Amino acid sequence: MSDPVSTSSPQITTPVGRSGDLIASYPRFLWRALQVATDGNWLFYGWMTLLTAIALVGANAWAIQVRDGMIVTNMSDHVSWGLYIANFTFGVGLAAGGVMMVIPAYLYDDEEMHELVIIGEAVAVAAILMSTLSVAVDLGRPDRFWHLIPGVGKFNWPMSMLTWDIIVLNGYLVINLHIVGYLLYMRYLGRKPNPRWYVPFVFLSIIWAISIHTVTAFLYCGLGGRPFWNTSLLAPRFLASAFVSGPAFILLVLRILRSTTHWEWSPRPAQTLIQIIRVAMSVNLLMLTSELFTLFYTGSGHAAAAKYLFFGSHGAIGLVPWIWAAIAMNLIGTVLFFMPSALERGGVRIIACLLCIGGIWIEKGMGLVIPGFIPSTLHEIVEYTPSATEWKVTAGIWAFSILVLTILVKLIAAVRQHSIAMGTHS
Amino acid sequence: MSNGAPFPTLPILDQEPSNRRGFLKACGATLGLAAWATALKPLTEWAQDVSVEEFLQKHYRELTADQKQAVFHRLEEDCRKEHGVDVTISDPQAIPGVQFAYALNLSVCIGCRKCAEACHIENNHDRATNNSYIRVFEMEMGGIDFEQGNATYDHPVPQPGKFYMPVQCQQCENPPCVKACPIEATWQEQDGIVVVDYNWCIGCRYCEAACPYHARRFNWEAPQIPAEEINPDQGYLSNRIRPQGVMEKCTFCLHRTREGKMPACLEACPTGARVFGNMLDPNSEIRWVIENKRTFVLKEELGTKPRFYYFFDE
């Protein structure tokens, strides 16, 4: 593989011959990683302190929620899932979107993408962490978490789609942790990564990425009692929007990485990602149009939730500002992405990324999970706005996940820069 | 490694080892840990209420007879300690050859909500939320359109031009909620009743999303009931006081019906709109209604096969 590290000088190559040494030096690697993770300039410390502070606020809000009950949320028996599950759905998409770096790199042998693909895998790890935490805080009885462990608890597989989701999400986390961890460790040792140890997992991760978002869509569209979700277009729509939000988020991470490290790369991988976003967003908007046509032109009872979402129903308009904001953000973001200047490094691209991430976050969360419950299965209209607790917990989860992402990316950059430095010395 | 070869150092670590930096990091780590401990302190207050036995309790269907007795005894103890009330936790089993079914005569229901009230009292529901497993809809004559229905009416009944439609768990033969549950905390019993093990449920509420009939309820907080109003005749799988953070639902009052009594909602009905019984018994009233009345079930197109029938008189 196009790994400059593998061609670096023997000076940093630790004499590791037997596999025993390989294992013995692993704790040392982890210790170094910890040191890298906790060392930096004042900007870095400020950033990490800020994220920790937000995570602490979230942790405290969650602890109070566990003690006092989920009454501290604004969910109800009518709208029984809210911001947490909305954020979960978005997070799964973010994780799946990382595969849009893997496919060009490994299926189309894009050498320049290959250098950066590990960033996409790190984003996937952090996004899966965010999704898992979002579900964990939604449990009424987190103390009974062990009931979900296959073999120990009672795992209702293959019947319950939720068990499928647990399997694919954890599988995806393990696959990506393995790939990122293995590549980093090999680079740290100064050894050439053995393709046999990671390339099969990379290809597995491609299929797996599709599966996590498909299964997450099946969670919703498999429910016959919720007409708004019960559409076969849901999984394809989820994937299309994931292939926008994932690459857009990665573009932002790359932007930050470029200004905080001395790591240089060609503009082409980012351009590839933008081409992917252009296609995926167009497909996403086409499917949305198709969905809306079927709902509104037919005018059947199935349109009740869509009517509430887009125009309000019986004076209840809680989601109307959300969905129109999402549509505006998605449309403006898409137009910006199609501008030639989006292919150049600069502000247009950044704004386009932020708009599409925001738009898709709403489209999949407040614009999809919530209207599934409004009107209720017996056509009652009970509205929902997230409570302060829900916002705090969600912000805490974002902060914690970004904290983990920061550490991962910092580690990747550190290992990387060192090898370049050594290479120039020799 | 054993020969003491220098380890590769990362660039950031290339600088002179600084004791000051190490000291600051240690301080930071200590402060961080203290902050996390403080933030999560409410968890320790909550954990005091969860005993080790409760935490380790197995799934209802994996408990031996002795273990079940120990669990029921512990729950009775807990109730005495918490509410100062002596209760009996029973566990009547499904009777072989019995399939329960319910029917409701929409021609005579007047929407008085006595059934919902009886459910509230019988099943030890939270008083503040006025919870009940039954929601009564005031419907427009001329159709069965829930969109035109209203479950929060507050006026004398019956109103002209309206009819009334109580909805509760349909005890589906093909229950979407059971399929949804990731941990088999809810299942269908031999007599057709869908139950929840309140000590196994993790509170993910996927079943609540899956139910097409709004039949399931979540305990958003621990139910509050004045001691003198607690119904002491409790079933483990039915009306015992539920813990915080778990699902609950109508069980056709199995602690009564499996003992030969009628459900509380039926007994409370002043118009005789409700018919309940064993539909396998050819002489039962429910069987007569199913065979002779023009009955219908809610959302038949979903394939859930409800055991709750609605009918009109001619």
Image (cartoon, coloured by chain):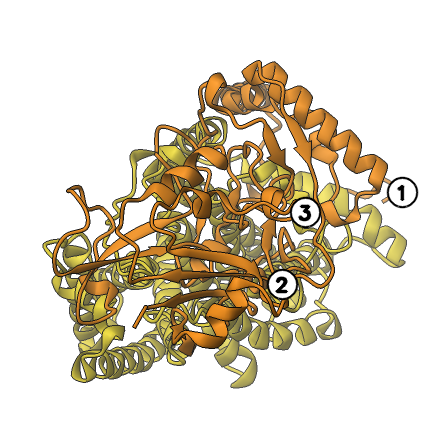
Chain colours: A yellow, B orange
Residue B233, numbered label: none
Dot 1 or dot 2, earlier in sequence: 1
Residue B3, numbered label: 1
Residue B99, numbered label: 2
Q: Given this view, does label 3 or label 1 mark the residue nearer the observer?
A: 3
Residue under the image location 53 percent in, 71 percent down: A209
Chain letter for the residue marked with disc 2 in the picture: B
Tag 2: Cα neighbours inside 10 Å, few (<14), some, or many (≥20)? some
What is the CA distance from the residue labelled 3 to the residue labelled 1? Answer: 48 Å
A175 and B4: which is toward the camera: A175
Indicate the quadrant where residue A376 lies. Answer: bottom left
* Residue A278 point in image, percent of width and height: 29, 79
Circles 1 and 2 on the same subunit? yes
User: Is A74 left or right of B263, judged from the image as shown?
Assistant: left
Instruction: Find numbered disc 3 in the image and state the secondary structure of the residue it sits on.
Output: helix
Residue under the image location 13 percent in, 60 percent down: A312
Q: Are marks 1 and 2 in contact (CB under 8 Å)?
A: no
What is the CA distance from the residue labelled 1 to the residue labelled 2? Answer: 77 Å
Instruction: Residue under label 3, please give it.
Output: A147
What is the CA distance from the residue labelled 3 to the residue labelled 2? Answer: 30 Å
